[in-house]
Image (cartoon, helix red, strand yellow):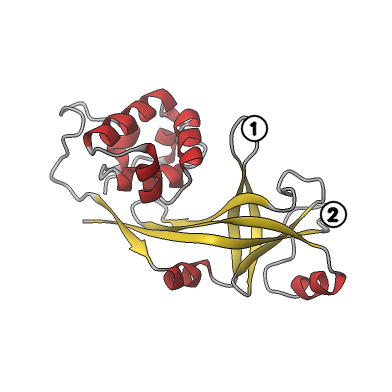
Amino acid sequence: MNTPEPEAVQRAEPAAVARRVRERRDQLGLTDEMLAYQAAMAPRYLRHLLDVGPAFDPAGFVRIAAALRMTWSDLLEGRADAPPGQGDPGPRPLLLHLTEPECWDLVGTHGIGRVGLPVQPAPAVFPVNYAVDAGTIVYRTSARGAAAPPDGSPVSFQVDHIDDRMSQGWSVLILGEAHHVEDPDERERLSLLPGTAPWAGGSRAQWVRIRPDEITGRRIGSG
């Protein structure tokens, strides 16, 4: 799949990219909700991405392109040699659904992910280093930090791996509730898990546990 260089992501005009997404979505007879599901993201987050453009979350737009059966180049830059929606004979992106066990296998025991919080006026997304504990996601942050949701808040958690040219990779999206871990013994136990030492400086005493309600995953390839 022909993929533009990172400079092209920065040059892309959000309004033009959003127009191409909506044109292709309408051609395929999809709603925002259907497109969001295929791209493994919440509908509200999809609408936010269309407002802010590819530079905010390039991997998210790779999944949108694959869900729309467009090349990354077509979505980002448009095509000068064909009407909207008419593809070239080259390889097209494919989205393969992952099972829940496959999703957990890719998430692994720890790593770097992004937690999405439902704040106004648009969802906020923050990178955090996480660990997996008994089928939940745990991470630590500052008690009043931006990545510390109120106890019981609905959140999303996303882990991606896209190769350097964004031609293939995978994405896992977890939807659930965030809960504060208050028990001192439990906090001490969690601190011994691999990957839980916070990368950011400063105090990170607040532990957050995300209990999944829904786990979806997509593998991105071409064919």
Q: Secondary structure at mark 1?
A: loop
Q: Earlier in the sequence, mark 1 or mark 2?
A: 1
Q: Name the amino acid type tagged 1.
A: Gln
Label 1 belongs to which residue? 120
Which residue is located at x 16 percent, y 27 percent? 83
Q: In the image, 74: left or right of 182?
A: left
User: Residue 222 appears in which quarter of the rendering?
Assistant: bottom left
Crowd rating for badge 2 (residues with CA inside 10 Å; few <14, some 14–19, many 20+): few
User: Residue 25 appears in which quarter of the rendering?
Assistant: top left
Which residue is located at x 35 percent, y 50 percent? 38
Return the mark for residue 203. Answer: 2
- Which quadrant of the figure contains the C terminus? bottom left
When the figure is inspected, residue 4 is found, relative to residue 163, above or below; the finding is above
Badge count: 2
Image x and y of residue 219, in percent: 36, 60
Image x and y of residue 14, in percent: 43, 27
Q: Are marks 1 and 2 in contact (CB under 8 Å)?
A: no
User: Residue 19 appears in which quarter of the rendering?
Assistant: top left
Image x and y of residue 51, in percent: 48, 28
When the figure is inspected, residue 158 is found, relative to residue 111, above or below; the finding is above
> Looking at this view, is 215 or 131 the one in front?
215
Which residue is located at x 71 percent, y 74 percent? 193
Image x and y of residue 208, in percent: 72, 59
Q: Name the amino acid type tagged 2.
A: Ser
Which residue is located at x 22 percent, y 49 percent? 92
Crowd rating for badge 1 (residues with CA inside 10 Å; few <14, some 14–19, many 20+): few
Return the mark for residue 17. Answer: none
Q: In the image, 160: left or right of 38?
A: right
When the figure is inspected, residue 67 is found, relative to residue 133, above or below; the finding is above
